[in-house]
Image: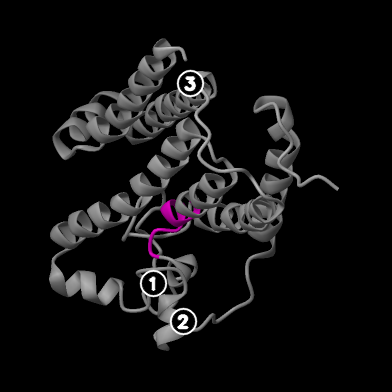
Amino acid sequence: MNPGGWAEFAAAWAAFLVSHALPARPAVRRRLTASLGEAGYQIVYGAVSVAAIAWLIAAAGRAPLVPLWSTEIWQMWLANLAAPLACLLVAFAVGAPNPLSFGGPAAGFDPSRPGVVGVARHPLLVALALWAGVHTLANGDLAHVLLFGGFGGFAVLGMRALDRRRRRELGEAEWARLSACASDWPLAALLAGRWRPQSPPNAARFVLGLALWLVLLALHPLVIGVSPLPPS
């Protein structure tokens, strides 16, 4: 066993957490946006985040192999069924009005017609949690369980942290008004009768989500080195 592999993995996790937590702190964000502008901040923050994630995934692959469970066909099928759902959530969430989470502007949001926010208040984080959860099941070695389990925990804790921050920033009355038809957890508002889809899904975003899934499916064996498809 190579202990140096665990040291790199730990360092990559530290870099990932710092790169996400520090720039998001209100005081730090204000300084960065003052220097870079909002668009510049988003570009730099996104680039640093992608680099940190890439290093973390690579470090997990170089960590010592410690098997925890064997991968079964049903686990691979579950991951392949969940992946397009996660991609559709991303496609419908990016750029959509959403003052309750991150990744979307507040302008144009109608609380009575919340769109993807009716499906999930934090659609990007739900997509991350879904992707991470099924990948945890499909990768039964210690490093990848820590990797994907950590991503899932990061997503769930992020939802709670964002809720507290937005509730504090908006105030209780405005939070209640904006979140009246939003889902705390996927489809919760639909099941509770607080929200009903009022128009067909946007076809362009639907196609974009499926295209994203197909691209990731094609790139998986090239970038990760293994096919995500179950053996025939």
Is residue 48 left or right of 228 when viewed as pictured?
left
- Image location (x, y in percent) of residue 2: 45, 12
Going from the N terminus, do you reach mark 2 or mark 1 first? 1
Q: Which residue is mark 2?
A: 190
Query: Residue 222, how many percent across, how many down?
Result: 73, 26
> Going 35% across and 28% down the picture, which residue do you hit?
16
Q: Are marks 2 and 1 in contact (CB under 8 Å)?
A: yes
Tell which circle, 3 or 1, labels the residue nearer the N-terminal end.
3
For marks 2 and 3 on the same chain, the one whose residue lies earlier in the sequence: 3
- Along the horizontal axis of the image, is 160 left or right of 140? left
What predominant SS class does the magenta segment belong to?
helix
Find residue 183 and name its label.
Answer: 1
Tell me the kind of residue under disc 3: Ala
Query: In the structure shown, which secondary structural element does the residue marked by tag 2 occupy?
Result: helix
**Residue underneath mark 3:** 63
Placement of 85 over or under 176, stated as above or below: above
- 3 vs 1, front mark: 3
- The boundaries of the magenta stretch are 121-127
Query: Given the image, on which type of amino acid does mark 1 rest?
Result: Ser
Which of these two is toward me, 188 or 133? 133
Q: Nearer the viewer, mark 2 or mark 3?
A: 3
Please name whichever residue, 157 or 8, is drawn nearer the observer in this view of the structure: 8
Residue at the (41%, 37%) spot, across then down: 146
Q: Quadrant of residue 167?
A: bottom left
Q: Residues within 10 Å of mark 2 (few under 14, many from 20)?
A: some
**Among all residues in the image, which is located at the extreme right?**
232
Question: Marks 3 and 1, Cα distance to the nearest angstrom?
Answer: 38 Å
Position of 200 relative to 5 (above/below) = below
